[in-house]
Amino acid sequence: MEPAKPSQELLRSITDEHVLRALFRHRLLTRAELSTETGISKPTAGESVRRLTEAGLVVDTGQRTPGGRGRGRVGSYYALAPDVGTALAVSIAPEGVVAECVDAYGSVLARADEPIGRPARPEDVSAALALAVDTVTALTLAVDVGLKLEARPRIAVVSAADPVDRHSGRLLQLPDAPFLLGEIDPVTVLARRVDGPVIVDNDVNWAAEAERAVTPLDDFAYVYLDEGLGCAIVSDGEVRRGHRGLAGEVAHLITTGPEGRAMPLIEVFGALGLRRPHSTAIDVGLLLERRPPEVVTAVGGLIAALTTLIDPELVIVGGRWGTPLIDDLAAETARLARPVPVRAAAVEDEPSFAGARADALFRLRELIVGR
Amino acid sequence: MEPAKPSQELLRSITDEHVLRALFRHRLLTRAELSTETGISKPTAGESVRRLTEAGLVVDTGQRTPGGRGRGRVGSYYALAPDVGTALAVSIAPEGVVAECVDAYGSVLARADEPIGRPARPEDVSAALALAVDTVTALTLAVDVGLKLEARPRIAVVSAADPVDRHSGRLLQLPDAPFLLGEIDPVTVLARRVDGPVIVDNDVNWAAEAERAVTPLDDFAYVYLDEGLGCAIVSDGEVRRGHRGLAGEVAHLITTGPEGRAMPLIEVFGALGLRRPHSTAIDVGLLLERRPPEVVTAVGGLIAALTTLIDPELVIVGGRWGTPLIDDLAAETARLARPVPVRAAAVEDEPSFAGARADALFRLRELIVGR
DNA sequence: CCTTCTAGGCAAGAGCCCTGACTAGAATGG
DNA sequence: CCATTCTAGTCAGGGCTCTTGCCTAGAAGG
């Protein structure tokens, strides 16, 4: 809205940004290729490379254009300097912690999987988190023995399978809702291990982010039905998290329960005996065995509420029991006063981790271009 | 995200935009004042004025700095050219149509009120709309007898007291929901009367827009309780309208009805005999007379759904029966599993019209600066 | 060995913005 | 009444950035 001050320096920074983004995409480019790729003239692109090299963001790799590719003069390939840094993507789930380190090109440099025993105690989760991150950081250093000045990632993006407070990054227990990991605080665990911001959000929000990358829709909802209940809202092309980051924490939504009684969604599972003993989690195995129609009706109430309140173009369903019940849910929503298309999630492979990884990459690049 | 191509022309356009925006704010400025106001150097500001005058966007008003204000040389006051155009703001409600014409400074040039008889038939509404717009356009011409080349406004923003399809701008009847104006099509009525885009949206969304201008919150919900039921959602600082523009059309939301039965919100009013005979509207007078606790419970269910799905920092309540019941609603929401503050609307004077007018002004300015 | 072709550099030129000095012109004040 | 003071606006100079067009270096092809 408010445009920046007009100045020559603004032009220069835009040029440099174009050059850096072209290198994000193509990894290795000559000055001539940079010029055609960005649409900037050759002398200007060359000058930008000189500036960026001086600033330490870009290096001459020493590689030359291979003879095979034409007759002309050989060109020098430039690339991002190794010390532009890396980003960390982390997933924390009851099964375990996964951490990956990605570079500014989007390549995964290293990965660490750290299982957690059942039941997951909060201190076990925090320990696994610390261990996974330390492991992946060490592996990254081993992969790249170059003169990396700073071993720590410049940013971390964390996906957690529980409600997350948007401002503190802490995991929150909501009354009576499933709470799988406990009151852990990823920001504190990672502060010493990351040289920059630590972003934490709910796994369902990240899964929706991953879905958004492959779905051209601006407005959809992502309903996640697993041990926990969750939902993410994409509106006007962005995941909307709400004030505290608790948008889509739907355990308490009033819906139609057994015998037409109004009750919170989570209590439907209690009334049907589908919650795991001594736990707030839903018993997925039992639910899939019985497939009670009351559950479909109750989720239909959730989808109806989504339709009336946020008007999605599509409802995407994921999770270990959501996907198998997709046809029942589609039939149920077709009967609603305002029907809405329902479809299974397109991203099946670690969806929330994929979303967190994509965001980590995006944020790392923003840091590098200096926004 | 994607920055523009770096070019000298970009700088120039940014300079011109700064100059125009300074004139939006201050109406009458000398070149020297423009320089200090925008932070741009005197020669550059002067050059921009020269360009904009040439382009016909800015004129030398002929007025000179008054002698009283200092000793120095007199300066020339510049202003926007009269033919930068005007914007139209329109409100369509069962009581009648209101239209105002505003200029780029935000001054109201003319206003027309056109009542509609009860019950409002769609053709009466369309006729009143046309008449109000024609009246306000004629009045605008009468106010400013200068050489205005184009009498028609460059943009119209319409508030309608019914659900609006986001893409077509048509009013939509949702099953069983209150429908006050009928299937009218403001875009078609205004197309010949406006020399540019016609934006139509629900009145509650515009009221939320007005509230957003005076409330510093990024995430809130606006619940409107009147003859119709509506709600608007502000998330990350913007009103979110959903795919078809039907976000917040809550008549069918499942809530707790009489005797704890799950039922759509609108049916609660039917069950309690609070709907007007031969109409889909709620009988506000009767409701305020009886103040049944079941209504408070039912709206509590709506607020609970808002809290779980979009996590607002605050719920703002407006409308002819929402405001009087604010204390009951606050007490009800305090008992929820996730309590949320509730407050009456701050903008009381024609809130939806104020929001539409502000948006009309904003869009007119964007047209002028050429975005 | 000459031709062909491409990466990169150089030179010239145009445009935009800035600083600092200058001019025009009105009010102030002795 | 005239010198002083003060301000709006312009001018000159300079620094940058971007672009086009031309030139050079250097490798492959024939």
Image (tube, coloured by chain):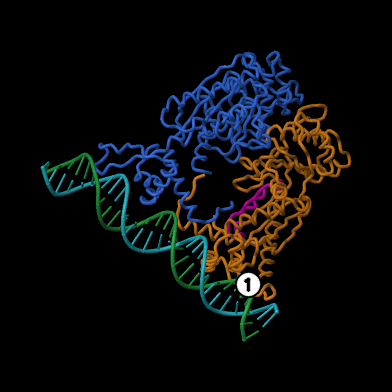
Chain colours: A orange, B blue, C green, D cyan
**Amino acid at circle 1:** Gly
* Count of labels in the image: 1
In the displayed structure, A297 sits above or below B56; it is above
Pick whichever, B313 or B266, lies toward us.
Answer: B266
Query: Which residue is the site of mark 1?
Result: A146
Is B107 in the magenta? no
Pick whichever, A73 or A181, lies toward us.
Answer: A73
Pick whichever, A282 or B187, lies toward us.
Answer: B187
Q: Is residue A181 left or right of residue A9?
A: right
Residue A125 in the image: state x and y as whole percent.
71, 53
- The subunit letter for the residue under badge 1 reads A
Residue B24 in the image: state x and y as whole percent.
44, 38
Residue B281 in the image: state x and y as whole percent.
67, 18
Question: Which segment did they paint magenta?
Answer: A181-204
Image quarter for residue A301? top right
Which residue corresponds to the image point at 66% horizontal and 27% vertical from the top-left?
B171
Residue A119 in the image: state x and y as whole percent.
77, 50
Q: Is residue B62 left or right of residue A94?
A: left
Residue A20 in view: yes
Q: Secondary structure at mark 1?
A: loop
In the displayed structure, A154 sits above or below B100; it is below
